[in-house]
Amino acid sequence: MNIFKSIQLGFAVVLLLAIAACGKTPAARFYTLNPISSMDVDSQKRITGRHIISIGPVKVAAYLDRSEIVTRTNPTHLELAGFDRWAEPFEEIVASTLAKNISSLIPTVFAITDVWPEANVEYHLLVKIKKFESDKNGNISLDADWGLMKHSTRKMSTVYESNIVTSGSSTDYDAITKNMSLALAKLSKEVVAEIKKLGMK
């Protein structure tokens, strides 16, 4: 093999390796929110003698209704994570986390996200998430409107507005989702305070 053919062969090998490397897409990473630790009780005993509250509908702002995690880099610019995504629809993650948090915070309340006709639901928690995002420093902002609607009358006496901020020090998505979980825990505690006023303690 002469020198010219050797150079051609070497170039072809390098080119093929480069194409193969370009064809490898980084693996997507999937996240959820972490609920407040639930009590270690027998699952069959948890519903007995409890008040039942349904969680939802939970609605999120259109810009959050996507699989990518959203970060606000300045007041008018949103950045979508390339490979860091929610494991389920974001509305479902928020609703299920709220349900678990409320059930953990009030032993007499069983919060559910899927209502079956036979369930003796007393109240419905309705939530509209207007803002739930990280900034470029990892700080979380959560703005939500919510209220408790009585099942028997289908009326909501009061609508509440919550504006929650949790401080962060990292833009790593593990840290961001952990911080978002803390923000949702704070919202859950505000909801629980109002539930207790209804006599469910």
Image (spheres, rainbow, N blue to C red):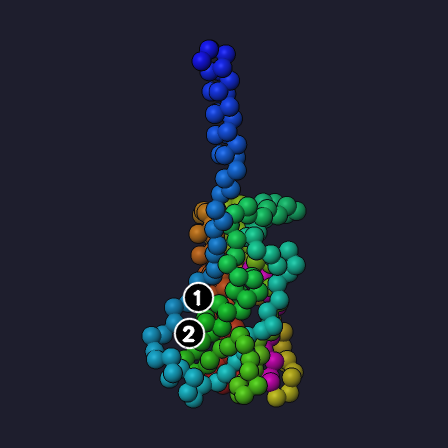
Per the model, the C-alpha gap separating discs 2 and 1 is 9 Å
**On the image, numbered disc 1 is attached to which residue?**
35
Location of residue 52 with respect to 17 vertically, above or below: below
Is residue 57 in sight in this rendering?
A: yes
Instruction: Give the residue pinned by disc 2.
Output: 104
Magenta-colored segment: predominant secondary structure: strand
Q: Is residue 157 left or right of residue 29?
A: right
The total of numbered circles placed on residues is 2
Find numbered disc 2 in the image and state the secondary structure of the residue it sits on: helix
Query: Which residue does the image show at 48% across and 67% down from the upper left?
Result: 97
- Range shown magenta: 142-151
Q: Nearer the viewer, residue 197 or 52?
A: 52
Residue type, mark 1 in image: Pro
x 58%, y 79%: residue = 124
- At label 2, counting other C-alpha atoms closer than 10 Å, the crowd grade (few under 14, some 14-19, many 20 or more) is some
SS for dot 1: loop
Crowdedness near tag 1: few (<14), some (14–19) or many (≥20) residues, C-alpha within 10 Å:
many
Q: Position of residue 92 (x, y in %)?
A: 55, 66
Where residue 146 appears, as percent x and y from the top left, is: 60, 71
Q: Are marks 2 and 1 in contact (CB under 8 Å)?
A: yes
Residue 148 in the image, given as x and y percentages of width and height = 58, 78
Q: Is residue 7 magenta?
A: no
- Amino acid type, callout 2: Ser
Q: Position of residue 62 (x, y in %)?
A: 66, 59
Position of residue 178 relative to residue 194, above or below, is above
